[in-house]
Every structure is written in C-alpha cells, then in structure tokens.
Image (cartoon, coloured by chain):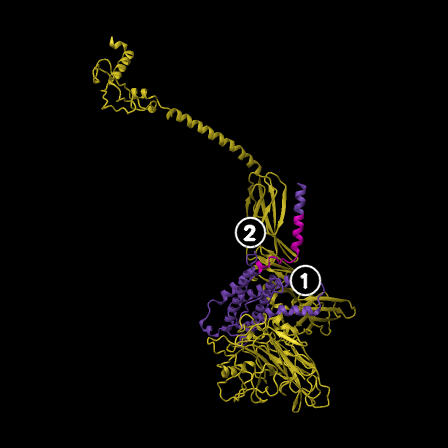
C-alpha cells in the first residue's frame, strides 16, 4: 500500500510542475478550435452575401506554402497562425464604422483573436527561450541569414495581407469591400487549417 | 588587354549537341531588357535554317550584308567582330562578319559556334562599348530546337541567358545581375527574378567565375546548361581621364521609415560633381529614378518618399555626374527593406496624476498605415527604464500595451523614464528614446478607490473596492482588453457599467450577461459632488474564470485489475486556452480510504486494482489561470466492479475442461446403452427369425400390444407339400407353405434340395415339438 501511494504522490508532483508552464502541447487543439469559432462567426456575418458586391471581388493571391524547411513544422505553423492572427486583428481594428455585420460579432472576433494572439505569443516566446538554451552563441551574421530564410514564406503572407489592406483603402472601406474582406479572411483561416491538417498527417495533431 | 571569359557547360558530362548549333551571343543593351531584345529577335530570326556542315548562313531578310564563308571558332579578330545587321540594327544568331555595328542601338556580336560542350571562349576587348565598366551585357546561349524537319534546325531559342554587369577597371569581378533563362514565347513570370536561395548565394561577388543554374528546362532536355562568366582585368589602364569614378562605399540605411543612401563621394570635391541614383524592384523591368536622390551634391540622400512594397527585393544604383560626363553605375546588393530596417525609438507621452503616471506609447515610424511597421503594430512590446529623479534607483518595466500606468508613486516628485520598442518575435530591438521627465501632482482629493476585487454571486458579478471616506458616490467603467493593443487614446473606448453608476456603497452588483466571453479591464472612480478622483488601478478580468463550471461526466470501463475512466471536457463557454486538469478520487466501495489522481488527459487508467471488487470514482476540474484557481464541484460517484481476475478464470477453465470430458463420456455411454437396448447391432439367427415372424425383433419391446402369433406349418406325407389348416385348439394361424408363394427370403429356402429330406426333417421336428398331437 505505501509504495503504491508514494508512486501516486510522485505522479501528482510531476503534473503540478508541468501545469505551471504554458500549456502549448495542446496548441493544435486550441488553435483549431478557436479558428473554427472565428470561421463560424465570420460565416454568420457574411450571410447573406449581397449580389451587388460580386463585381468588387478581387483575387488577393493567398500564399500556398507556409513551410520554410528550416525549422520544425510545428514552429512554422505557430508562426503562421500568429501572423494571421495579428494581421486579422489589425484589419478588424480600424475603420470599422462601415463594418458589414453586427457590432457584437466584431467584438467577439477581436476578443478571440486577441486571446489567440496572447496564447501563441507565449508559446513562441517559450520556443525562443528554448532555442537560446540549447544553442551556443550565434554570430550576428548567422542570425541574419536565418532571419532571411524564415522570412521568405512570411513575406508572402505579409504581401497578401498588404494587398487586402490596400484594397480596403482603395474602396474607401465601403460595405461591399468589407463583405469581401470578411469572406477572404474566413477563406484564409479555413485554408491554413486544412493545410495544417495535411501537414499533421496521421498524427494526433489537428 | 582586358578580356571576358565565358564558359558554357552542361550539367552532366560533356554533351554532344546535335546539329552543332551552339551559339553564344554577347550583347550590349542600354536599358532595353533582354526580353524586349529577344522578342524582336524572334520576329526576325524565327525561320532560319542552320546547316551544321556548311558555314554559310542565310538570312531570310535580304537586307543583310554579305555573309562570310568562314566560321570563327576562336576569339574574334577585330574584323570579325562586327556583327551582321539588319536594317533596323538587329541580328540573327549566327557567326559571321558584317558591317561594324553602330554603338547606338543594341549591338550584338556572335562569338562562337560549337559542337560540343563544355566550351570556353575568351573575348578580348572588342569595342569601346564593350569593356570594363560596360553597363549591361547579356550573354545568351542558343541551342538547337528539336524541329520535326531534320533539315532545318532553327537555332532561335535561347536556352540560357545571363546578364552581366562588367565591373569597372581594377575590380576583377563581374556581377551577374539578373540571371534568367526562358524560352522565347514564354511570358515573364513574376517569380522569374526570385532565384532559389541557394542559387542566389552562388552569385556572391568575387573574383573569377560566377555561376548559376538556370531554372527552366533547356532544350537539351535534362542536361541543363550552366553559364559561367567571369571577367578579369589584369592591368587597369589609367586611360579614363575623362570618365568620373563612381561613388564608393555605398550604403543603404533604413531606420523606421527613414530611407537613406550614403556614399563616399569622389575625391575631387572641387568640381561640380553631383550624384544620381536609380532603383529597380523585382516586379519592375526598368530602372526608375530614385526620388530625392537626383543630382545630389553631398554624400547622402533621403528617399523616404518612395512608395514601394517593403517586402519585395529592391536594388539601387548610383553614379557620379559632372556636366556631360557620367561615371559608371555602382550597384548595391539586392535587399528587402523590411529586413534591413532598424527600429528607432518610440514616442512617449506622459500624463501625471498624484500617485501614478500614465504613459502613452507610439510605435516607431509614421503614425499612419504607410509605415514599414504598420503591419506589426500589435506585436510591439515596450521596455522602459524608470527612476525617480533624486533616487537614481532604476526600475525596468515591460509592457505589451500602448497605454500603461505606473502606480504607488509619491505626489510632487519628479520621475524620469526612457523607453525602447521591441519586436520580440523577430528578435528586433530598437534604441532608447530620449529621457522624459514629469512631476506628479499634489495629492488629490478625493482619493482614488483601491483594491478592486471581482467575485460572483448567483448569476451576477460583484465588484468590490476599498474606500475610506463615506460621503462619495462611485462609478465603474469597463474596457475590452484588446483595445490596449492598438495605439491611440482609448478614452472613448471605456464604457459605463449601468448598475455601478452613482452608487454609494463600496460594491456594486451587475448581471453576468453584460460581458460576453473575453478579457476586460475594470476601473472605479469616486466623486464627492464637486470633484472626482483619479481612476483606480485597473483590474483585469477574464470572464471565463467566473462562469460556474459543471462537473465532468464520467464513464468507466473495467478490466480485471484496472479501471479506465473517461472524463468529458469542460463545456462551453469555457476558454480553450486555459489549461485544466482533472482530479479523480477513487475508493473501494467497502473501505473508506480514498486515493487521488490528478491527470491532464481525458482518458486515464487506474492500475493495480483487485479483481472482482466494486470501485467508485468521482471527479472534478481544476482550472488554472494566473492567480486564480477555479474548481468545479465533484461529479456524482460512479461505481464499477472490476472483472474477475485472470487467475480465477484460469482455474475455472481448468475445472470446466475435465467436466466437459466427463460429460462427453457419459453421453457416449448412454448412447451406447440406448443403442444396445433399442437398436441392437446383433442379429438373430436366421432360423429363429424365420420361425417367428417377418417382423424384425428390433421392434419387439417397442411394438404395440398386438399379439404375435406363430405360424403353423403342417406338412403332409405326399410329394407335394400341402399345408392344411387346422381349426381345432390350435389357435394359430397357419399358412400354406408354398415355396412359390413363400415370402421367405432366398436365404432360407432350399429349392435345390430334395423334398423328401425336407419332409422327414420337418416331421421329426413336429414330433419333437408336439408329441402329444401325434399320439
């Protein structure tokens, strides 16, 4: 009886220590849940889509590949989702007087995105800390090169969001422009969710 | 003598080219892109027939000059260097001699005709237009296309093209500017300039040879052509007294939205030397004048007004100018502005209260959305160093928000701070801003409320705070937490809580449904009629922590020595981001000792249990967030009995087997008995069978109560056997025995025997059987 009990106590002790750090192992579950929630909110906002807005449709050139091959895939996924979270938050935070949808949906989306941003930021910070711990001193040059390689796929993503923002500006934040941008951001979320599912393959992730 | 060495080789080993139709063209262009040149060439040269044997080249366009009958395989002599031109100055790809090309239009010079790769050709300095410092040359390699007509092998499609910028003298290297390879009729794609990173790296500056690998497939099929070109200028002649030297040590510096180009001007600063710069991005085809950097007299210029995509490649070039003369262009490395940019200092605005300071941050760069940092607005974090002016003990504070407050300060004191902006996830850190100082005000009456607490009661939130004075009214406000991520004054974003307006108590109650799920800030202010206090310290509230969470549902599966417990996840509207753990308590039904397990997975197994015992389990959630720990109630206990152990089952199996065996044996014996009694295997001897009946004796015991009667045979002493019936006391049925009519089987009838022996035998039997009857 006593050895069994002590085993349980150790068990508990291990878990408590683990619990105190940010729970990033369930990241995939959380991110996909939140993203699906956002997609649902965006869907409810964009129905019905007025036909007169169809002529304003524009192809924004969603970047097809987010994997950079220079770091683990999970890291790429985290960074991409962080980027799309902050960019979507950025887009929804300004010039929303003509926003095509209910106010409460907008605040809910922003709320969710802010939470997701916070969460992903913590996870990425922890990753960076781990990097620092495991690797020796990097020279500045090496760091610069690394930054260069990583940025290629992220630059494409940036370019994509820049095009969306420019479109909104050009159309002067009209009702139709907002409708189209909502649909586009929803599409972006869905695309990356599916992409990460494909990357995950048979794993339990996503 | 300066020379250009060009080498064309195949990726794989030396390749034979069919039709010996390999050309190399060195072409000088002045601003026209190679695409333009190629298109023009295509129109003129599309249907040339090139013979491999003959050195005669014909042009469909009869305006050309005479064609030499010799082909030159080596370097061109000065006479041969002159190209063959059409009337509009274009050339078709063939070697040969023609009129000397003019130096105005694009000049093309054929260099080589070869049969086999690799090929190296050295081109001496040919004309004034081609030499050190020459601006823009393209080296094109033309190979045969696979045409269906064997006789015609038009060599029209360039497989490999490289643009060279030949360096000025004294720098023995050439910059390969825009390597590209494509077929004639393909449209340039937007990605044509973005070489894979590894290819790019091969193009490092250096001495000697540069190489790259063409991305498109060449017409030679799998063996791609590699173009290697290099230039060496062994002895820089000092003979350009008239040409200016291009600027040296050119640097691009980007700090926030400030784009600066710096250089070392030429040493002759006395003269009226000005500098001009151009730029080109990967989306553009031509060099464009750089605004703000035209005819600059100093040694730096500012081109911040440029409206470009910060995430695309860009290259700059600059040259010195003096009246009519210009120096050669100096090209900078290609760079991406976003990567090269450095973070400047943030802007800080301070507001003082009596015991707190409000800090408003503005991210570096322009405030509007044209800034290079605009898209990273929500990623900024600020770290500031804060100290009291007299004390000099520094405090370091980090914040994510664009507005922050420092509390617990003394009134009427001077405080100073300096801040820097960081983009932590990009490993970027800016410089510190200048020091800002501010004085806190005199102590303000009424004082601000303190120690805000939030709790729940039934379905409402209860907001409580501390306050000493009794004669004041309070009001409370709330703000979405994400509002702090965007710069700007949020004064208009704070909203009133209606139940907490003008309350006299140090608490207020408001329903939970005011706040949707999310994170909020709450603040309280006191007012005594005339004056209002400063706002209290803001309290961050995450509404999920206040929802009642229902206990989990449990289901169990049992094995003989363990139980598997399945727990459901917390239901909506729970926050997915906050970690939660389960606490499971289980005990044996009869005993009282409880054991606890804490787990994270929703499916856990409790091992080491006794078989065939009843165990009960109850569970609850623990949710953790920062300071708060939220626990649900325990679920109802669910009991499940463990299955019998494998040990006892084994015994059962062992016990059952012999039982089965025994049962089988018993069954077999019974069956045998039955068979023996009811279905005997043995047969009666034939005589008895004959005598008694046709009915088999098998049915003797089972037959009905029908009486068996014996047949009686009376045999008379005659030749023929006659059976007569007797009707006195013999109550048996007798039957006539007639061999013909007998139903007896053949076994028992002796038709071959003599009748007499039969009769005598029968008589004897009769006598024996019924002695009484004869006498």
Q: Residue B711, located in which quarter of the rendered image?
A: top left
- In the picture of the structure, the residue carrying the numbered disc 1 is A131
Assign a secondary structure to mark 1. helix
Magenta stretch holds residue B772: no
Point out the frontmost of discs 1 and 2: 1
Q: Nearer the viewer, residue B570 or A147?
A: A147
Q: Is residue B31 above or below residue B394?
A: below
Residue B226: x and y, percent? 59, 74
Q: Nearer the viewer, residue A31 or B334?
A: B334
Q: Residue at x 45, y 73 (%)?
A: A52
Q: Which colour is chain A painted?
A: purple
Over which residues does the magenta segment extend? A10-30
The chain drawn yellow is chain what? B
Instruction: Identify the chain of the residue marked 2, using the numbered disc in the image.
Output: B
**In which quadrant of the rendered image does the C terminus of chain B lie?**
top left
Can residue B491 be seen? no
Can you identify the residue that label 2 sits on?
Answer: B568
Position of residue B672 measured from the top left corner of the image (x, y, whole percent): 42, 27
Identify the mark at residue B412; answer none if there is no mark.
none
Question: In the picture shown, does residue B71 fall above or below B216?
Answer: below
Type of secondary structure dominating the magenta stretch = helix
Position of B767 compared to B205: left or right? Answer: left
């Amino acid at each position: 009886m006593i050895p069994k009990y002590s085993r349980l106590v150790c068990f508990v002790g291990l878990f408590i220590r683990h619990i105190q750090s940010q729970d990033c192992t369930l990241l995939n579950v959380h991110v996909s849940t939140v993203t699906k929630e956002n997609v649902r909110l965006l869907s409810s906002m964009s129905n019905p889509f007025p036909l007169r807005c169809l002529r304003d449709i524009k192809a924004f050139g969603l970047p097809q590949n987010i994997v950079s091959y220079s770091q683990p895939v999970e890291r790429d996924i985290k960074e991409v989702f962080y980027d799309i979270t902050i960019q979507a938050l950025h887009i929804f935070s300004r010039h929303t007087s003509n926003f095509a949808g209910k106010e409460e949906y907008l605040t809910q989306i922003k709320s969710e995105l802010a939470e997701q941003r916070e969460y992903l930021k913590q996870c990425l910070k922890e990753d960076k800390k781990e990097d620092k711990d495991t690797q020796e001193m990097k020279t500045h040059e090496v760091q610069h090169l690394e930054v260069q390689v990583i940025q290629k796929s992220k630059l494409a993503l940036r370019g994509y969001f820049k095009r969306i923002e420019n479109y909104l500006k050009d159309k002067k934040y009209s009702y139709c422009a907002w409708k189209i941008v909502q649909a586009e951001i929803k599409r972006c979320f869905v695309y990356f969710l599916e992409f990460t599912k494909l990357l995950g393959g048979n794993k339990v992730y996503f | 003598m300066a020379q250009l060495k060009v080498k064309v080789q195949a990726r794989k080993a030396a390749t034979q080219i069919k039709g010996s139709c390999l050309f190399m063209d060195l072409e000088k262009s002045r601003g026209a892109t190679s695409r333009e040149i190629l298109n023009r060439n295509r129109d003129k040269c599309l249907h040339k027939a090139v013979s491999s044997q003959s050195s005669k080249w014909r042009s469909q366009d009869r305006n050309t000059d005479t064609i030499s009958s010799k082909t030159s395989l080596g370097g061109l002599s000065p006479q041969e260097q002159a190209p063959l031109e059409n009337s509009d100055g274009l050339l078709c790809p063939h070697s040969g001699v023609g009129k000397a090309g003019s130096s105005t239009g694009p000049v093309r010079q054929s260099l080589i005709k070869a049969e086999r790769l690799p090929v190296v050709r050295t081109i001496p300095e040919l004309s004034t237009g081609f030499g050190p410092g020459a601006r823009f040359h393209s080296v094109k390699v033309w190979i045969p296309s696979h045409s269906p007509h064997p006789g015609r092998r038009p060599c029209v499609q360039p497989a490999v093209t490289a643009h060279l910028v030949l360096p000025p003298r004294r720098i023995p290297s050439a910059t390969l500017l825009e390597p590209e390879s494509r077929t004639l009729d393909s449209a340039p794609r937007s990605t044509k300039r973005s070489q894979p990173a590894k290819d790019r790296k091969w193009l490092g500056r250096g001495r000697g040879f540069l190489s790259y690998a063409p991305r498109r497939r060449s017409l030679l099929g799998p063996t791609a052509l590699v173009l290697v070109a290099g230039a060496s200028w062994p002895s820089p002649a000092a003979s350009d007294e008239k040409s200016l030297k291009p600027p040296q040590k050119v640097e691009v510096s980007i700090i926030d939205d400030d784009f600066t180009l710096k250089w070392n001007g030429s040493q002759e600063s006395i003269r009226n030397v000005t500098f001009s710069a151009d730029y080109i991005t990967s989306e553009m085809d031509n060099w464009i004048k750089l605004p703000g950097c035209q005819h600059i007299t100093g040694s730096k210029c500012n081109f911040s007004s440029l409206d470009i995509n910060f995430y695309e490649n860009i290259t700059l070039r600059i040259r010195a100018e003096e009246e009519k003369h210009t120096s050669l262009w100096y090209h900078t490395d290609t760079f991406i502005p976003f990567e090269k940019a450095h973070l400047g200092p943030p802007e800080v605005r301070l507001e003082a209260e009596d015991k707190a300071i409000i800090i408003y941050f503005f991210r570096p760069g322009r405030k509007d959305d044209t800034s290079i940092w605009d898209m990273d607005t929500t990623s900024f974090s600020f770290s500031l160093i804060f100290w009291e002016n007299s004390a000099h003990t520094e405090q370091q504070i980090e914040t994510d928000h664009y507005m922050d407050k420092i509390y617990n300060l003394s009134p009427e004191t001077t405080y100073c701070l300096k801040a820097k902006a960081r983009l932590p996830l990009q490993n970027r850190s800016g410089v510190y801003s200048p020091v800002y100082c501010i004085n806190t005000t005199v102590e303000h009456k009424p004082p601000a409320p303190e120690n805000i607490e939030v709790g729940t009661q039934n379905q409402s939130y209860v907001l409580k705070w501390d306050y000493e004075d009794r004669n004041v009214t309070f009001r409370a406000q709330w703000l979405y937490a994400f509002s702090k991520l965007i710069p700007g004054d949020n004064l208009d974003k704070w909203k009133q809580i209606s139940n907490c307006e003008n309350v006299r108590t140090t608490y207020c109650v408001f329903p939970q449904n005011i706040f949707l799920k999310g994170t909020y800030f709450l603040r309280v202010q006191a007012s005594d009629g005339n004056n209002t206090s400063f706002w209290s310290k803001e309290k961050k509230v995450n509404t999920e922590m206040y929802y009642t969470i229902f206990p989990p549902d449990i289901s169990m599966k049992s094995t003989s020595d363990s139980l598997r417990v399945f727990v459901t996840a917390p239901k909506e509207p729970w926050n997915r981001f906050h970690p939660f753990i389960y606490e499971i308590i289980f005990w044996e039904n009869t005993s009282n000792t409880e054991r606890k397990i804490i787990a994270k997975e929703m499916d856990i197994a409790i091992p080491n249990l006794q078989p065939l015992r009843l165990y009960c389990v109850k569970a609850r959630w623990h949710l953790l967030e920062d300071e708060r720990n939220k626990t649900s109630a325990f679920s109802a206990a669910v009991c499940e009995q463990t299955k019998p152990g494998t040990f006892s089952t084994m015994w059962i199996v062992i016990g059952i087997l012999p039982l089965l065996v025994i049962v089988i044996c018993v069954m077999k014996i019974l069956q045998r008995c039955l068979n023996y009694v009811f279905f005997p295997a043995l047969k009666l001897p034939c005589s008895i069978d004959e005598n008694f009946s046709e009915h088999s004796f098998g049915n003797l015991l089972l037959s009905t109560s029908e009486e068996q009667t014996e047949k009686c045979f009376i045999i008379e002493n005659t030749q023929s056997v006659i059976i007569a019936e007797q009707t006195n006391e013999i109550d048996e049925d007798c039957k006539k025995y007639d061999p013909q009519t007998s139903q007896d089987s053949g076994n028992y009838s002796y038709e071959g025997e003599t009748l007499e022996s039969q009769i005598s035998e029968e008589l004897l039997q009769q006598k024996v059987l019924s002695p009484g009857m004869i006498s």
